[in-house]
Amino acid sequence: MTKTKSNSAVEFLKQNLVLCGIVVLIIVTAIAEPKFVGAANLNNILRQLGPLPFAALGMTFVIIGGFIDLSIVGIISLVGVVTIGLIDPLGQVGALLAGLVLGAFLGWLNGFVLTACGAMTQAEVLFITYGMSSVYTALALIYTKSETLRIARSSKPYTIFTTLGSGNIGIIPIALIVFLLFLILMHLFHTKTIWGRAIALMGGNKDAAYLVGFNVKATMRLAYAINGLMSALASVALLSRVTTATATSGAGYETNAILCVVVGGTTLKGGKGSVLRTMLGVVLITLLGNCMNMLNLSTYMQTVMRGTVLVIAIWLDNRKEL
Amino acid sequence: MSAKANVNKIWAVISKQKAVVAIIALMVMMLFFDTTFYTPYNWLDMLRSTAILEIVAFGVTVAVICGGCDLSCGGTLCLGGILAVMMVNKGMPIWLAVIAALVSGAVVGFINGFLVVHQKTEPFIITLGMGMLLKGICQQLTDAHPLTCTSLEFMKLSNMKFFGTVPSLVVYMLVLFIIFYCIMRFTSFGRNCYAIGGNYEVAKYSGIKVVPIKWAAFIISGTVSALAGVLLASRMNTGSSVYGDTTGMLVNCGVVIGGTSFAGGVGGMVESFIGLFVIQLLTNCMNQLGVDGYYQRLFEGILIVIIIASDCFGRKLKRERV
């Protein structure tokens, strides 16, 4: 009897490793540095969430679909500079919409290239999206001539971006509210709509999805288009926060997004996972960064920690299956 | 009939050797421009510029042929260079510094091998995380400053010239090429690598010691990357944590472009050499023609996408024919 009880405790630990990690992290840091639980730091953490959760949210769908996307570096950079560049000719609403449409289009283009050449394994997808990322970054460089674009330089009003970047409702940043809205939307999309289920089915078994009669190619393009759209949102969140955009501002987001998704517990093999789990991954990674800042560890050690967490998370994830 | 057969034969050769076709196309194109492209100096210079990446690629190819992949080679390269410079600056003999760097690479390869081969995790995501981890370690070691080497002897390692004209890097590259070609072609280890990459289960039941051999492939990949890092540090006379940021993806891309399949079991040193040489040749051609740096990146991305996409397309056609 006791044995089964301890087994179920272990089982619970295994299933909710990330949650336990978050709790342990909070307790340890709160004891070592009481300022950690103060209101100022809480506000800080909420702000630090910033663009990463958007990118991770989009990446979740691609990974659930059994693929991977390295091109969000390029998408975030290109959308950022184009959005700022379009504030003057189109006005702020037009620029925002154009940026989002561009992001979705670039994502769709990835999916189109992949389906057109019939890339089916993760390795092929990895390299093609890497090439696409080079192309997008190069376009951003050509567009800006590697100058830094600033929102403040545009002559039209740009209140949407400043509100999104630094506005608050009570203690909660507006960017976070927008994100929560999208989180709920995407969760419903993933669990309740036929397209969301099709993506998961495609990740589980492509041949079965094809034989059942799903249009696998269209599903794949859809997953990538969603990823592009979410990357565009991440880009808008980023440029609103820092009020500038450069042709390399997206650097590093691809690994961090994949890190959050995988740490959250979505398997790279595809088929399993959820957007809520990704959210846990994002919280863990952001908290980890914040805790290390509070404990006065160098930024470089944070990179080491992220790498270690990624390697260990994949390892544990894999052991669960054995 | 025979004409048609010939056309088919030529088409088969072309579709197999896309990288060679790209090289020939670029060389023919350069005939029409009045540049210094066709001079011995330019060709030696091209070989010297590409030597470091080629050396990394030789190691990575062994891992890829075994059905693995090593994206951590950028981090290993960085770490090897920094360790060597640090030890030489402390006054240790150069041979000891080089050996220490090689050992560090071997250790990284050993850990990669443990996680990928022994624990059966997905190679590219594990090595991606490992690369991130190593990057952090490198930044921590150097405090993100470039480390200048004080020893002239160490600098001579890759800056001297044999016979007055041939740069030493080219000689190292050729020697390593011959060694690796012979290993993969004529030793049982090399042939077993192909067998493991071709079909892991069959190789296992044929009595090949699959785990140690694949593990060794990762160790070789790490060691060779570290060696390349030492040579790069000697060439630049500095060890810096910014080296190797793009090396991981670029080298693996080059290996795949050459025709070494990520599925494993196909390809070889010649293919990898050609694959990376294409990228260098493209850069050189564009430099000769005075193409803007941003457009160079664009064309590089397009080249990667086209070659890998056409590769996928060929496999797709083959699948559908069967």
Image (cartoon, rainbow, N blue to C red):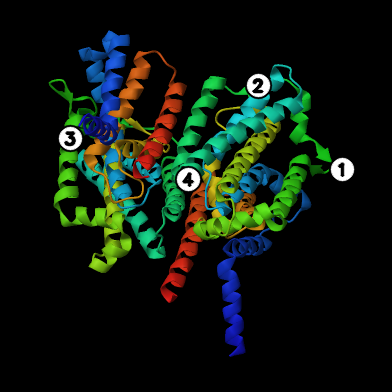
Q: Is residue A63 above or below residue A209?
A: above
Residue A55, position in %: x, y? 30, 39
Residue contact between numbered discs 4 and 2, judged by CB atoms under 8 Å: no
- Residue A95 seen in the current view: yes
Residue contact between numbered discs 2 and 3, judged by CB atoms under 8 Å: no
Residue beneath disc 3: A180
Residue B286, position in %: x, y? 60, 51
Residue beneath disc 2: B86
Q: Check disc 3 and report its element: helix, strand or loop.
A: helix
In the image as oriented, which residue stretches furthest toward the bottom? B1
Q: Which of marks 3 and 4 is in front?
A: 4
In the image as oriented, which residue stretches furthest toward the right? B163
Q: Residue at x 66, y 33 (%)?
A: B102
Q: Check disc 2 and report its element: helix, strand or loop.
A: helix
Disc 3 residue type? Leu
Q: Which of marks 3 and 1 is in front?
A: 3
Q: Mark 4 lies on which chain?
A: B
